Amino acid sequence: MRDVAIVGVGMTRFGELWETSLRDLFVQAASEALHSARADHLDAVFIGNMSAGQFVGQEHLGPLLVDHLGMAGVAAGRVESACASGGLALRTAFVEVASGMSDLVMAAGVEKMTDSIDVTEVLATASDQELEAYHGITFPGLYAMIARAHMEKHGTTEEDLSWVSVKNHRHGALNPKAQFPAEVTLEDVMRSSMVADPLRLLHCSPVSDGAAAVLLCPLDQAKKYTDRPVRIRASGLATGSMALADRKDIAFLDSVQLSAQRAYKMAGLTPADMHLAEVHDCFAIAEICCIEALGLVACGKGNAAARTGETALGGRIPVNTSGGLKSKGHPVGATGIAQAIELCEQLRGEAGARQVKGARIGLAQNMGGSGASSVVHIFEGI
């Protein structure tokens, strides 16, 4: 396999973008990525998207989107793994380049969620339809059960959950493309309305529109496109039981642990080698569970990490410097690519006020549903 690098990035602002269509969001992000790499062609495009068919009534995204980019004829297709669709698109593009099939490949993600009549119903398709959705459980409800299990097993409190939101909004306030670039206080979070006990409104990521794109090429060709390539050291993918009822321990995300183990092995690295991480904080409890399963903190100790500053900027292992899904926003198909862009900016030293000093190795973890799928990538600044 060939070594692979990211040589260009592009991303829209995330938010309620009522006046911009799905196709225009993609074109904005893709054009920015091409321009940043001084590239005028593509060999292939892989587009992460969870559910454009239900959100905006549009399937068959590959030919539609590359045509609107002005590149009709390019090999293109959609990749889906619920909220991990962007991460899976990146992995697919990585394999395409590493295998030698193509030399310049775009991995993109896009979602237009605010046009949907019932976002909750569409998102519920990422859960087990017979065992969960049929009985009326929603994703806030599923993650509320995960939170309750973590509380019972590890003594986690509602305040612990709230510190995750406080930290990520503090980071997101420094991100000009975040949907909610504003700080919140502990009191703000704990007084916000209850959604599914113990999860309150400010423990939950928002409904978002947006797109993100990255360009990949062989590492030995990267200097044709940029002076600061970022190497993809590893990619790990794993799945787990869809329904919470089928899991041995709903407070631990097996698929996240397995995808991370595969990525660490491929990279020849350990959790202790990571300088920062972007993880899938669709709900505050998700960040706590993810950093434990990734080995960034000990099992059962993730609940204190945000409160003590361990995962904040300036801490031992900064997590979600972008603001995470909570503050940056969560247009589900685009999230995994946006995580990669944050790490590229960090490893290039281009993250501005949220820059992690001396960052050279970073990890991105993107998750589908309540953890039925997980993709982990490890990046290195060159």
Image (cartoon, rainbow, N blue to C red):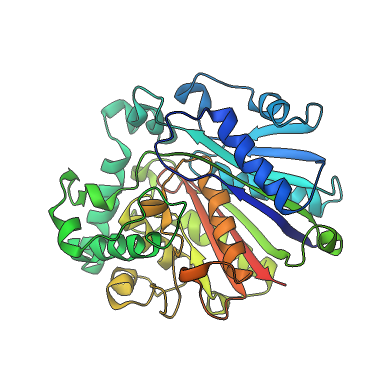
Where is residue 371 drawn, in percent x and y? 44, 49
Q: Is residue 102 above or below residue 345?
A: above
Where is residue 168 drawn, in percent x and y? 36, 62
Residue at the (61%, 70%) spot, across then down: 347
Where is residue 35 drawn, in percent x and y? 72, 48
Where is residue 373 drawn, in percent x and y? 51, 47
User: Which residue is more in the foreground, 210 or 289?
Assistant: 210
Q: Is residue 49 left or right of residue 220?
A: left
Q: Is residue 142 left or right of residue 371?
A: left
Q: Quadrant of residue 314?
A: bottom left
Give the quarter of the figure containing the N terminus: bottom right
Q: Is residue 280 left or right of residue 78?
A: left
Any part of residue 1 in sight: no
Residue at the (60%, 52%) spot, across then down: 237
Q: Is residue 23 above or below residue 309?
A: above
Give the quarter of the figure containing the C terminus: bottom right
